[in-house]
Image (tube, rainbow, N blue to C red):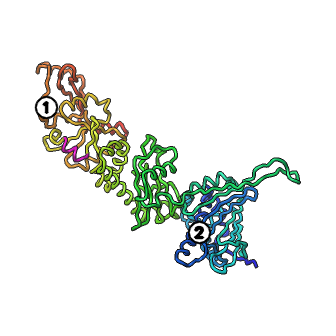
Amino acid sequence: MQEKGTISIHTENIFPIIKKFLYSDNEIFLRELVSNAVDATQKLKRLASLGQYSGDASNLRVEVSVDKEAKTITISDNGIGMTAEEIKKYINQIAFSGATEFMEKFKEAKDANEIIGRFGLGFYSAFMVADRVEIQTLSYQDGAEPAYWVCDGSTEFEIGEGILEERGTEITLHVNAESEEFLEKGKLQQILDKYCKFLPVPIKFGANEQEEEDGVDEEGKTKYKTIEVDNIINDTNPIWTKAPNELKDEDYLKFYKELYPFSEDPLFWIHLNVDYPFNLTGVLYFPKIKNDFDTQRNKIKLFSRQVFITDEVKDIVPEFLMLLHGVIDSPDIPLNVSRSFLQADSNVKKINTYITKKVADKLAELFKADRKAYEEKWTDIGLFVKYGLVSEDKFYDKAKDFVLLTNTAKENYTLSEYKDKVEATQTDKDGQLIYLYTNDPAKQDSFIQSANKKGYDILQMDSPIDNHFISHLEQKLEKTSLKRVDADVADKLIKKDITLETVLTEEQSTKVKEIFDSAISKPAYKVELESLSPEELPVTVTMDEFMRRMKDMAAMGGGM
Ligand code: ADP
Ligand code: MG
């Protein structure tokens, strides 16, 4: 007996709107339907483990197949199935109430992009690519009757007796004319790879392919033979679901290669695992940094219960860690909301803080455990660390113990070690510590030589982040300022045990100085006669540090 009914939503014309605005992301239909199938098998597993199902709960699986001739895609599972009553309840009411909610959000949203891809349309997303959807299902419950449901994308549906003899659900999409690309095996494989690669139940992807055979049939048509192509597309036990102590370095490296086949090995990784106050697992890798930052960004994949959601993790991962690679899996990140909501979400904020702390702890641990190895990686790590400590105070508080200053002799010092090193020689009369640095060792070579000669140490600060790093250190370090090596500060420092020999008589010196002073008449510059055995640099021209910074700023076009 067939029964007819009407789905109770207020808007009759919702399908064209959804199709239009979700078009760019309509591939998520497969993610949603496969997730539902996986959920159904997981529910069965749970019932069995609770003793509420005594049938065979082994060999749970999901199967996706495509029939190009019939223009159908079928997703089937041997999960809990549904009774006719359940279809009415879960598919008709719940799924479609989701559609009503979508319409509400759609009306509120200023920008269609705010909702695209973020809105879990669930079962209903099937209608983005199909103009008819059929369900055949048989519930696990004793004495359940198979049920059938079909809907053509209007608000009308039909429900009746089904044909399944085995427990589970089979959903068939009659793919619409605009979506025929999804009938391509390669396309489906690609979508499954993207979203379903790490789902916890084996997913078999079988495409019945028609292959031309020699000869023709009785009616004179080309003969085809059907070949079964099937494979399990997923790894049901990805490493982030395992306990860190079960894993070896090889496992992490292998997984990295699986995610980023053509990348160099990462420097190190962090296994995230927290269940309170939010749930989160994942593995974050520190890659070798290349110069093209942009292509390296957005490499972190966000999952929710092993279903891929997005690689836009902007608000979840702190900005300074956007160059990291890896995966984060959290059922507690709201996915069905707009970006502005995500920023305000308290779980998202906590997750962000947690990741920052984990990264800081890991770096501290690496530094402590093997300083030499840490220093070897410093060129790559340094960028994250400096970026992190200038952008987040909480990170600075930890990073101040493992951020390294590198001098022109390529020696690395922690902040406190460096202070100890230069305190005696580089303090001025007012007790201010002066750190000298170069941002262009080649150009400033004469100043570096001259300062070294006087016994001063020069820090190398020539990475893109170092300008910010310098100002930040000045704010954070007590009674310390950083001056570029060509600034006129060196003579203000208290020199200890340094006597510079000169070959010039006092009279000669005065003369030479006069010549230089008149040649360089700008008040910002200062001429100094130094050392001066004939083979060395006899004169340096320095500039007031304040004037220099003003000049740099003007050159950059930035006013104050
Ligand atoms: P959600 O998955 O968020 O609950 P959906 O719209 O995806 O929302 O699905 C609605 C409901 O339909 C599910 O909660 C489930 O009860 C039922 N359902 C969908 N697909 C299946 C399936 N393959 N097997 C059993 N039940 C299903
Ligand atoms: Mg769902």
Q: Which residues are magenta?
A: 414-421
The total of numbered circles placed on residues is: 2
> Eyeballing the image, is 478 above or below 12?
above
Amino acid at dot 1: Ile
User: Element under label 1?
Assistant: loop
Amino acid at dot 2: Ser
Task: Tell me residue 410's x, y (percent).
Answer: 29, 37
Give whichever of 288, 174 is nearer the camera: 288
- In the figure, residue 412 lies in which quadrant? top left
Q: Residue at x 29, y 54 (%)?
A: 398
Q: CA distance from mark 1 to mark 2?
A: 82 Å
The residue to which callout 2 is attached is 58
The residue to which callout 1 is attached is 498
Q: Residue at x 65, y 51 (%)?
A: 186
Given this view, does label 1 or label 2 mark the residue nearer the observer? 2
Q: If the picture is divided into quarters, which one holds ligand 2?
A: bottom right
Q: Quadrant of the N terminus?
A: bottom right
In the rendered image, residue 419 lying in the magenta stretch gets the answer: yes
Asked whether the residues under the numbered discs 1 and 2 touch, taking CB atoms below 8 Å apart as contact, a structural biologist would say no
